[in-house]
């Protein structure tokens, strides 16, 4: 008998290749608003430094764009800091999602889940505007049964409540659900605390499992391309 009735996926760095998307965004920002930046700034340096300010998406956006202006802004830009910060925020919210790059293997993973007869939900932390735009850019609405965004739910991962809501909406027992995500606390510990039947960690093979999260370590895959095979081998 199959182990799972449903699967929930994280969005950023799971179905969405945030690293690649971010790189495209930073390159575009450098070119589009070239007149704002000091003349000596090189594009590679700009892109590299923006990734540092971004903290893999966990930095507050206001803080993120303020650091860009302070580090790379020409004198004129710094003098108009407030206006430029607002312009960069708008640029981020309009531009980033539009550049969304799917994680390699995204479509195959969704098809494998569907092929196994599983219901599918997204469980993601972030703002409605930002997450909805990324979901639309990746064309995910057509492939999932339910979407749960923390700002809409009023509760965010790792709170088990958001996982529970996804399962309630799908009408499946949490013990019969699988969550796939990249974050040890938000995804793995959160879904475990909710009583999910299994969690699958999408992560580089050399990344250590945090000791404080206890044992057993969740099973892991390095790429979504491995997911169809994993599901086939673990849903029996
Ligand atoms: Mg993530």
Image (tube, rainbow, N blue to C red):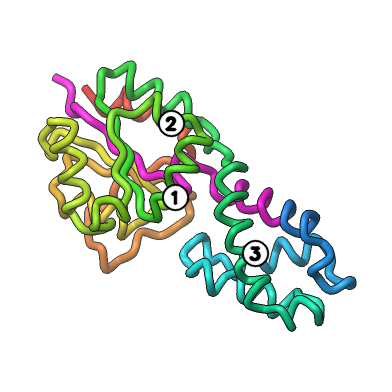
Which of pointers 1 and 3 lies earlier in the amino acid sequence? 3
Residue sitting at x 59%, y 57%: 92
Disc 1 versus disc 2: nearer the observer: 1
Left or right: residue 71 compared with residue 169: right
Residue sitting at x 47%, y 50%: 130
SS for dot 1: helix
Badge 3 crowding class, 10 Å Cα cut-off, few under 14, some 14 to 19, many 20 or more, is: few
Mark 1 lies on residue: 129
Residue 14 within the segment the image draws in magenta: yes
Disc 2 versus disc 3: nearer the observer: 3
Segment tinted magenta in the rendering: 1-26
Q: CA distance from mark 2 to mark 3?
A: 29 Å
Mark 2 lies on residue: 140
Which of pointers 2 and 3 lies earlier in the amino acid sequence? 3
Q: Position of residue 192 (x, y in %)?
A: 19, 51
Q: Is residue 232 above or below residue 69?
A: above
Q: CA distance from mark 1 to mark 3?
A: 17 Å
Q: CA distance from mark 1 to mark 2?
A: 15 Å
Q: Nearest the camera: 14 or 72?
A: 72
């Amino acid at each position: 008998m199959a182990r799972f009735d449903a699967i929930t996926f994280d969005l950023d760095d799971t179905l969405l290749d945030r690293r690649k998307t971010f790189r495209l965004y930073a390159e575009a920002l450098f070119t589009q608003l070239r007149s704002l930046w000091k003349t000596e700034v090189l594009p590679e340096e700009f892109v590299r430094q923006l990734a540092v300010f971004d903290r893999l998406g966990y930095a507050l956006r206001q803080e993120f764009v303020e650091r860009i202006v302070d580090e790379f802004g020409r004198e004129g830009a710094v003098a108009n800091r407030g206006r430029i910060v607002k312009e960069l925020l708008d640029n981020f919210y309009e531009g980033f999602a539009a550049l969304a790059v799917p994680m390699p293997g995204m479509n195959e993973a969704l098809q494998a889940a569907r092929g196994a007869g599983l219901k599918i939900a997204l469980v993601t932390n972030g703002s409605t505007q930002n997450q909805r735009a990324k979901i639309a850019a990746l064309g995910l609405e057509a492939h999932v049964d339910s979407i749960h965004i923390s700002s809409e739910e009023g509760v965010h991962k790792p709170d088990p409540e958001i996982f529970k809501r996804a399962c309630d909406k799908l009408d499946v027992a949490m013990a019969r659900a699988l969550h796939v995500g990249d974050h040890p606390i938000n995804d793995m510990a959160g879904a475990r605390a909710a009583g999910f039947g299994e969690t699958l960690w999408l992560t580089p093979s050399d990344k250590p499992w945090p000791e404080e999260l206890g044992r057993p370590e969740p099973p892991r895959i390095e790429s979504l391309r491995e997911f169809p095979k994993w599901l086939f081998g673990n849903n029996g």
